[in-house]
Amino acid sequence: MLRVESLSRSFGGVAALEEIDLAVADGEVVGLIGPNGSGKTTLFNVITGVHPVDSGRVLLRGEDITDQAPARIVRRGIARTFQNLRIFRRMSVHENVWVAQHSLPGVGPMTLLSGRSAGERARRAEVDGLLDAVGLADRRDALAGSLPLPDQRRLELARALARSPALLLLDEPAGGMTPAETAEMAALIRDFAVPGRTCIVIEHKLDLISALCQRLCVLNFGRKIADGAPQEVLQQSDVLEAYLGRDAGDA
């Protein structure tokens, strides 16, 4: 589904990513972990065209999508959420998800605005179904900015899923949540978001990562330091050192 080859990106002379290689199979769920500043979100930004690469390339289903515009990459079947929420705070919950359909094949501005065609009625019903699935059906008319943080993260997940993506990138989907809220989000992702698609998850909460992911890729200072099964990766000395410090790595 996705292949990243020798990918590098720097900002002002500081290397954020250095020669990253990553392959994700169709239907695989991969956790992308590492300390703050290790390059995880930068990798998502490069994959989705937010930042251009310095070198290397990104392949989706074998096709080179390196440095394509974000809108074009979305139309190829990639959707994402953001570590720092990007919801439309002054729009309703329903409108936030509905607007994500604006560039689907066969959907133009006039079709969306009219709301009269059978196709558009079906799309609006699909949005209602997504809101019901993420537990926001009773807040469909509320302003998105009025939702508590866990519900805003559920809303952003629903908006990404409105694209029916083949590849879903989740950037700290449980950020700022309590343990109970995190468990609920993990169950929602596992039971609703993941089936039928490929997924890469950035998350610091290893309980969520372990519950969802078949494989872990670990970044540190922009370099990949580990890649493999969770139970193996989390025991490696360089991974422990990256998270817990040099004493843990030497133990």
Image (spheres, helix red, strand yellow):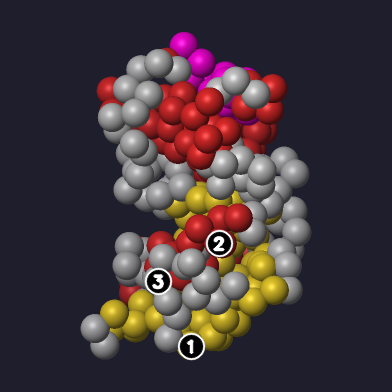
* Image disc number at residue 182: none
Identity, as a three-letter code, of the amino acid under mark 2: Arg
In the image, residue 133 above or below residue 237: above
Residue at image mark 3: 51
In the image, residue 98 above or below residue 38: above
From the top left corner, tell me how far across and down residue 40 is, in percent: 43, 65
The quadrant in which the C terminus is found is bottom left
Label 2, label 1: how many angstroms apart (C-alpha)? 20 Å
Q: Nearer the viewer, mark 2 or mark 3?
A: 2
Residue at image mark 1: 55
Callouts 2 and 3 close, C-beta under 8 Å: no
Residue depicted at 46% across the width and 11% down the height: 138
Identity, as a three-letter code, of the amino acid under mark 1: Ser
Disc 1 is placed on an element classified as: strand
Is residue 246 found left or right of 115 in the rendered image? left
Residue at image mark 2: 72
